[in-house]
Amino acid sequence: MDIKVKEAYEYIISHISTRPKIALILGSGLGFLANQVENAIGINYKDIPNFPHSTAPGHEGKLIFGTLFGKNVVVMSGRFHIYEGWNPSDIKLVIHTLKMVGIERMLITNAAGAVNTSYVPGDIVLVKDIINLMFRNPLRGPNDSDFGPRFPDMLGAFDREWMEKIKSVYPHIKEGVYLAVTGPTYETPAEIRAFRKLGADLVGMSTVPELIVCAHVGMKTVIFSCATNMAAGILDQPLSHEEVVDVANKVKEKFTEIVKNALEVLE
Ligand code: HPA
């Protein structure tokens, strides 16, 4: 195993007493769930050997171990974006470390622009597939066969069984395709028109590198996007991070309820 993963793993396990099987990654403006973790043990990313630490506004940067809605979890409060300068391999290190800790399932949340014009800001969408237009892959380089195969199948990334259980609670939840770009610029209206033709419903700057590593290591994943804004060019107005955070804040309760139910449908 990679020595960097080993060092990070050993640091983490020396600070926790139980090993969760579920991890949550919280997106822009969606970090509020981290405050609901009970019996929380927070470990700052900057204290974990070899861990990247996040700089984006609204991204706190710690692992929080504890109980959320009755489940033993670890919450990644703050994630690593390519636009911050992180390499996809940094994201791989984090997911590999979580895998070592014993994580089997991953719930990923993100803020995204709505490419699908039938969406409205504030919609919570269950992501059913992705398009990787980051043109990068965290698995590039020698394969670590202790973690997974050289050529992983991406279908396995999604936990369809978990998604079905979520849909039994929310039969009308929207399902969409998330297209990932690196950012940090928002897209142009022409790009959004092109993305729509490619089959995208949502566009964002995260999630896909994490999902790819989850697919590789066999971590079953569910992704919720909060459509915080109509994507570029749909409305006659500029996009801003303030709007993204503001809308994410407005759906706090709805989002919390969905995550609660998503955790509760698991045995
Ligand atoms: N584009 C890309 N990423 C985003 C957007 C967007 O419109 N909104 C929130 N994250």
Image (cartoon, helix red, strand yellow):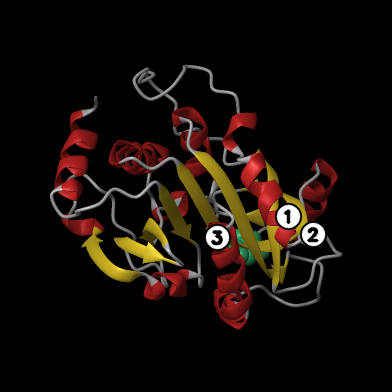
Task: Determine the CA span between mark 3 and mark 2.
Answer: 16 Å
Task: Check mark 2 vs ligand 1: CB closer than 8 Å? yes or no.
Answer: no
Dots 1 and 2: beta carbons under 8 Å? yes
Between discs 1 and 3, the one toward the N terminus: 1
Identify residue for label 1: 167
Pick whichever, 80 or 62, lies toward us: 62
Identify residue for label 2: 171
Q: Position of residue 172 (x, y in %)?
A: 81, 62
Is 246 on the left-hand or right-hand side of 150? right
Whether 61 is drawn above or below 17: the answer is: below
Whether 151 is drawn above or below 122: the answer is: above
Secondary structure beneath disc 1?
helix
Residue 243 found in image quarter: bottom right
Q: Position of residue 166 (x, y in %)?
A: 67, 55
> Which residue: 85% across, 63% down?
117
Q: Amino acid under label 2?
A: Pro
> Which residue: 82% across, 59% down?
116
Between discs 3 and 2, the one toward the N terminus: 2
Q: Amino acid under label 3?
A: Glu
Q: Position of residue 96 (x, y in %)?
A: 34, 36
Is 168 on the left-hand or right-hand side of 47? right
Q: Confirm whether residue 25 shows in the render.
A: yes
Secondary structure beneath disc 3?
helix
Q: Position of residue 107 (x, y in %)?
A: 52, 52
Task: Assign ligand 1 to one image quadrant.
Answer: bottom right
> Which residue: 33% across, 71% down?
38
